[in-house]
Image: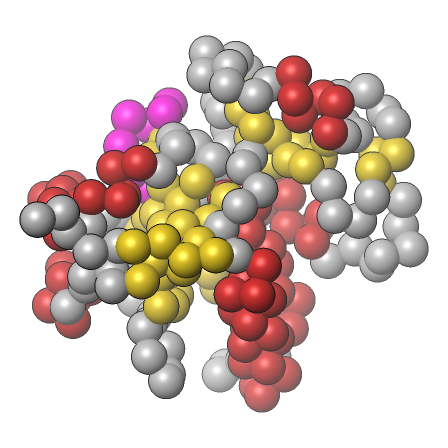
Amino acid sequence: MVPPASSPFDTLRRFVRKRSDEQRCELCGNAVAAEHEHLVEIANRRLVCCCQACAILFSGRQSARYRRVPRSSALLEGFQMEDEMWDRLHIPINLAFFFRSTPAGRVVAMYPSPAGPTESLLPLEAWNDLVAANPVLAELEPDVEALLVKRLAPAPEYFRVPIDECYKLVGVIRTHWRGLSGGTEVWHHIGEFFTSLRQRGGSEHGRPHA
């Protein structure tokens, strides 16, 4: 396991600020609401808070310094992942997210921890097999969309999400984790996070093509 690029860790502060704190677009300086758009600075994976006008400027500009983070998420119904496949990905906990990094030229696997996001070395062959079983993964937009995996009771769930949702989950865990096991409070907040994600998102068929 290796530490991630420095910038995602720094962005966690955006998700634990008090709601009364005024936030501003990091490009133009205009005030933004608590729920606002994000860009990813591709070179270092840094999330940038921005207003809608600045976000529109970077929509569809694949070669730009920044890329707009999409707003929609979806539960991948029928997603195919057996326990054996999960074991092959070498993720030490049952929460993780995966996205294709343009600068790295590969898929990056990360999982939340009390210290922040941690990068795991991902076997390429295992990921390719997962994509073959779930072609929807080939549609993820590089750098800004991720597969979010929750293999916790009562049943595993798999989501297609904007990358900022993944770092929001990391922020939840970092903020509320207590002691060695996390304590009951952090699991309550993790449950609330996924409940909100289901309510705000739709569903998408994740079965392999015939």
Q: Position of residue 23 (x, y in %)?
A: 84, 41
Q: Position of residue 30 (x, y in %)?
A: 87, 27
Q: Is residue 105 magenta?
A: yes
- Above or below: residue 51 compared with residue 175: above
Q: Is residue 47 magenta?
A: no
- Above or below: residue 141 compared with residue 61: below
Which residue is found at the position 34% from the left and 58% from the top? 76
Q: Residue furthest bottom?
A: 184
From the viewer's perspective, is 28 left or right of 177? right
Q: Position of residue 17 (x, y in %)?
A: 79, 55
Which residue is found at the position 19% from the left and 63% from the top? 81
Quarter where residue 157 is shown: bottom left
Which residue is found at the position 43% from the left and 40% from the top? 145
Residue 179 shows up from this direction? no
Which residue is found at the position 30% from the left and 66% from the top? 92
Residues in magenta, as a range: 102-108
Give the number of callouts. Answer: 0
Residue 54 shows up from this direction? yes
From the viewer's perspective, is 25 left or right of 39? right
- Above or below: residue 80 compared with residue 106: below
Quarter where residue 22 is shown: top right
Q: Position of residue 210 (x, y in %)?
A: 8, 49
180 and 204: which one is in front? 204
From the viewer's perspective, is 104 left or right of 79? right
